[in-house]
């Protein structure tokens, strides 16, 4: 026991607040998952747009711990938003998330660099436990870490674990219940670096350590925890007479810290062999970052992922749709026909179905992403793609979101979270919806079959296929182009760095994969889902209600008239069609007709544009209703009816090449997807970006369609 | 002997060097916290297929950084033995 250490004891508390902090790739999240399992929730750190993951676990029959997973950080210099949160929570004792105990997770197989953050936190003089994670790796390398000695040197409790194998997790839980020492001596003599400034700060406010004062000096302008402005001004005044170069102070501090760390590492680690298992990673890198094999394998991996998402997800999506059809039919049968049943079936249940149907794609994409991240392959993808992406204001990490956008922009945008630079992340989120997603496919298919002749003689390459490919290409070019433009418009909040660790390869961890899927699906269902259901209800109202008693008039017109030559089904379809025309959505469609006429669209297309805001593929269904095609499953009927439609002025076919292409281009560019807007709001935590995106993509679609129509007309 | 300083981006694959100093203050901080301290031995491990970024071994792990970032690090070459 250190004679000059004070002890804190929390064993009489019934809930203990424990923060987890550590370097990225230190296995912090793995430990968090091992500690809390499914008892997790995602919230928000107050005042900032950073997700806060917390979870609960019982330490003893009487003590429960709340674990808070702080964002991964290499140091306590707050540069990014994530790092600022970690810094703020640990340094500010008044913060609502300030922990009783802090667990610092360090990758034991990479101890030197990990000890940097450890040493800074130790100097804050808060109760800590140092967890040496990945002890299995250390043993495999044949190294030995003298944990007792390390504990003596650092003056804190040290626990060796392997979170992946669940080894030592129970020991750690027990350690939390025992008294903890708070080291009273400093890791480095920080006062030597800025003696006067530290004294001045300490004369104004009470801090727990010299290093805490030092941190205040360095971050005075963007510290929010100095409760009142008055204190901040007082400190600024006190420091006024001194010349302070914070960059210099921090470099001096870093160098000092590493001097001590190098000494400690030398004393506490014995390397048995000079040949490390790193050579496996080295060999694999030779293939995976190879100038030919690297890209070939990456393409193959992508191909495999998309095949799986397209084909495998199709089955559960079909089941979900059938399930909702069953539920809505059952509801319609049970409830008396009327407004309530209508709202439930066509508004709420239809909206819910539109949300849940995305779940299989989200789950699959995130399963793959979790595996790629966990194995260390994702870092290599960024490594080989960075130069290419940087030209367009993007980052090596933008590759996955962009390409995933071909399946669905919703999970794709959620996956942009791994991009640490704010600017590059916003650009990625902004341009991803321009990639042609799978919901556009039914629209493209219908329109192509309408206006592009089927060429049976050309074999594998037919016009229809080429046009479809061209549409995907146009989406990609638009995305890259928009990114390039934004690169110049957007001001960076922080410098873009690509200083990134390439972790050693490991086998993926199924618990992490499972929890990632669970987490992302939950987030989508509850955060984006609310907005989607709300908009669905509005759209339902618009298309199923009309001013006055117009609907009753339509019903009356057809009712009891036995002289119609149509079958009851055909007549029902006609009623539906007339009702949609008379509805608010129909009125809207008609009212926007002057605006969309230059694009070659009439009010019928106008209605479809409005209703397909729920999801693009709704276009097909709406067209079916308008042309009273009845059964929407039968595309053939809609196609025939649309083909037969004549232009009232020219008398030629309404769906000419010009109209068809104009419409396809419009669907390629317009932001007609409330799920995407909802998820952009969720990810950027402001309505600013979804709004800008909506209008930008709308304008792009309008202009491009206008040009297309006017050129082809 | 006067040290002939190069910048880190000029190393060839497999070459080792000792970090001497930094030419950019902001970058220096970021690199320092990642364990690139003066006196530390670094080795150029790999160059990405398109010529940028590069990967170096430092402090017992693999670090990737862009050439522009690496060029702010001055190093003295360790001659191959």
Image: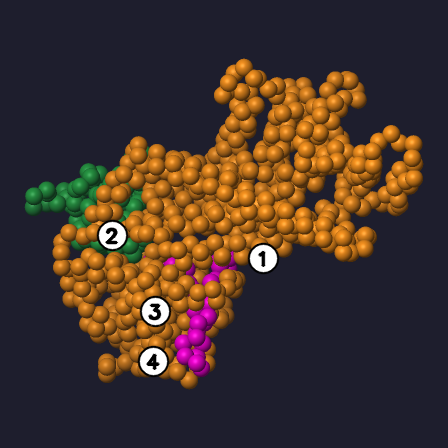
Chain colours: A orange, B green
Q: CA distance from mark 1 to mark 4?
A: 39 Å
- Rendered residue at 50%/33% (across/down): A476
Q: Chain of mark 4?
A: A
Q: Badge 4 is on which residue?
A: A178
Residue that label 2 marks: B61
Are the residues tagged 2 and 4 within 8 Å (C-beta)?
no
Whether residue A68 is in magenta: the answer is yes
Using the image, determine if residue A270 lies above or below residue A631: below
Residue in the foreground of this view, choosing between A703 and B2: A703
Mark 1 vs mark 4: same chain?
yes
The secondary element bearing badge 1 is classed as helix
Position above or below: A447 against A48: above
* Horizontal and vertical percent position of residue A11: 39, 83
Count of numbered badges drawn on the protein: 4
| Chain of the residue under label 1 | A
Which residue in the structure is indicated by mark 1?
A526
Element at label 4: loop
Q: Which residues are magenta?
A: A48-76
Is disc 2 surrounded by few (<14), some (14 to 19) or many (20+) residues within 10 Å?
some
The residue indicated by pointer 3 is A169
Tell which circle, 3 or 4, labels the residue nearer the N-terminal end.
3
Residue A381 located within the stretch drawn in magenta: no
* The N terminus of chain A - image quarter: bottom left
Disc 1/disc 2 C-alpha distance (Å): 40 Å
Question: Helix, strand or loop at disc 2?
Answer: strand
Residue at (67% x, 19% y) in the render: A713
- Say whether residue B70 is left or right of residue A319: left
């Amino acid at each position: 026991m250190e004679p000059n250490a004070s002890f804190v004891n929390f064993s009489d508390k019934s809930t203990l607040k424990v923060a987890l902090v550590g370097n990225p790739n230190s296995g912090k999240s793995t430990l968090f998952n091992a500690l809390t399992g499914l008892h997790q929730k995602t919230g928000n750190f107050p005042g900032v747009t950073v997700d806060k993951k917390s979870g609960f676990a019982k330490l003893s029959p009487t003590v429960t711990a709340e674990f808070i997973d702080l964002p991964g950080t290499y140091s306590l210099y707050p540069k990014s938003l994530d790092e600022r949160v970690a810094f703020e929570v640990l340094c500010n004792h008044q913060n609502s998330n300030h922990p009783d105990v802090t667990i610092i997770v360090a990758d034991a197989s990479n101890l030197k660099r990990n000890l940097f953050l450890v040493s800074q936190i130790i100097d804050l003089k808060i109760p800590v436990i140092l967890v040496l994670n990945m002890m299995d790796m250390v043993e495999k390398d044949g190294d030995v870490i003298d944990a007792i000695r390390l504990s003596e040197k650092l003056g804190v409790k040290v626990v060796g674990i392997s979170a992946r194998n669940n080894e030592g997790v129970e020991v750690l839980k027990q350690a939390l219940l025992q008294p903890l020492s708070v080291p009273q001596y400093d890791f480095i003599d920080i006062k030597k670096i800025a003696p006067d400034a530290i004294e001045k700060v300490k004369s104004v406010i009470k801090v727990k350590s010299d290093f805490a004062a030092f941190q205040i000096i360095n971050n005075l302008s963007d510290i929010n925890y100095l409760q009142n402005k008055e204190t901040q001004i007082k400190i600024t005044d006190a420091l006024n007479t001194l010349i302070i170069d914070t960059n210099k102070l921090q470099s001096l501090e870093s160098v000092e810290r590493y001097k001590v760390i190098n000494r400690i590492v030398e004393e506490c680690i014995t390397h048995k062999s000079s040949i490390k298992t790193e050579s496996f990673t080295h060999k694999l890198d030779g293939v995976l970052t190879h100038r030919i094999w690297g890209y070939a394998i990456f393409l193959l991996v992508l191909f495999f992922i998309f095949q799986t998402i397209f084909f495998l997800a199709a089955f559960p999506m079909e089941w979900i749709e059938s399930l909702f059809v069953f539920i809505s039919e059952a509801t319609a049968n049970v409830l008396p026909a009327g407004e309530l049943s209508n709202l439930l079936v066509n508004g709420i249940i239809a909206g819910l179905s539109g949300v849940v149907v995305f779940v299989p794609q989200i789950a699959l994409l995130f399963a793959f992403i979790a595996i790629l991240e966990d194995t260390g392959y994702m870092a290599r993808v960024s490594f080989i793609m960075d130069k290419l992406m940087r030209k367009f204001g993007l980052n090596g990490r933008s590759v996955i979101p962009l390409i995933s956008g071909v399946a669905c922009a919703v999970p794709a945008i959620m996956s942009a979270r791994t991009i640490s630079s704010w600017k590059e992340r916003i650009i990625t989120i902004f341009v991803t919806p321009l990639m042609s997603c799978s919901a556009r496919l039914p629209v493209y298919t219908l329109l192509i079959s309408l206006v592009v002749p089927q060429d049976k003689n050309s074999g594998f390459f037919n016009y229809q296929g080429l046009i479809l490919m061209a549409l995907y290409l146009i989406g990609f070019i638009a995305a890259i182009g928009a990114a390039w433009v934004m690169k110049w418009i957007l001001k960076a909040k922080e410098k873009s760095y690509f200083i990134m660790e390439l972790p050693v390869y490991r086998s993926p961890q199924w618990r992490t994969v499972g929890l990632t899927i669970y987490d992302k699906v939950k987030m989508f269902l509850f955060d984006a889902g609310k907005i989607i259901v709300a908009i669905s209800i509005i759209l339902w109202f618009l298309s199923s209600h009309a001013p006055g008693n117009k609907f009753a008039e339509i019903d009356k017109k057809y009712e009891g008239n036995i002289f119609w030559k149509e079958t009851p089904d055909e007549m029902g379809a006609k009623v539906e069609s007339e009702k949609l025309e008379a509805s608010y959505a129909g009125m809207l469609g008609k009212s926007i007709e002057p605006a969309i006429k230059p694009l070659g669209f009439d009010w019928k297309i106008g209605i479809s544009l409005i209703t397909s805001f729920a999801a693009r593929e709704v276009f097909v269904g709406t067209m079916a209703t308008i042309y009273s095609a009845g059964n929407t499953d039968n595309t053939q009927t809609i196609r025939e009816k649309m083909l037969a439609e004549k232009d009232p002025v020219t008398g030629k076919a309404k769906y000419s090449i010009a109209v068809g292409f104009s419409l396809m281009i419009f669907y390629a560019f317009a932001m007609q997807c409330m799920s995407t807007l909802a998820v952009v709001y969720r990810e950027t935590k402001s309505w600013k970006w979804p709004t800008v995106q909506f209008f930008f993509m709308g304008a792009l679609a309008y202009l491009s369609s206008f040009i297309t129509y006017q050129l082809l007309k | 002997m006067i040290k002939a300083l190069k910048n880190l981006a000029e190393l060839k694959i497999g070459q080792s060097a000792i970090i001497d100093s930094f030419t950019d203050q902001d970058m220096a901080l970021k690199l320092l916290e990642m364990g690139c301290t003066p006196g530390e031995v670094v080795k150029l491990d790999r160059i990405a297929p398109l010529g940028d970024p590069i990967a170096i071994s430092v402090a017992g792990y693999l670090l990737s950084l862009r050439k522009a970032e690496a060029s702010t690090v001055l190093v003295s070459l360790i001659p191959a033995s």
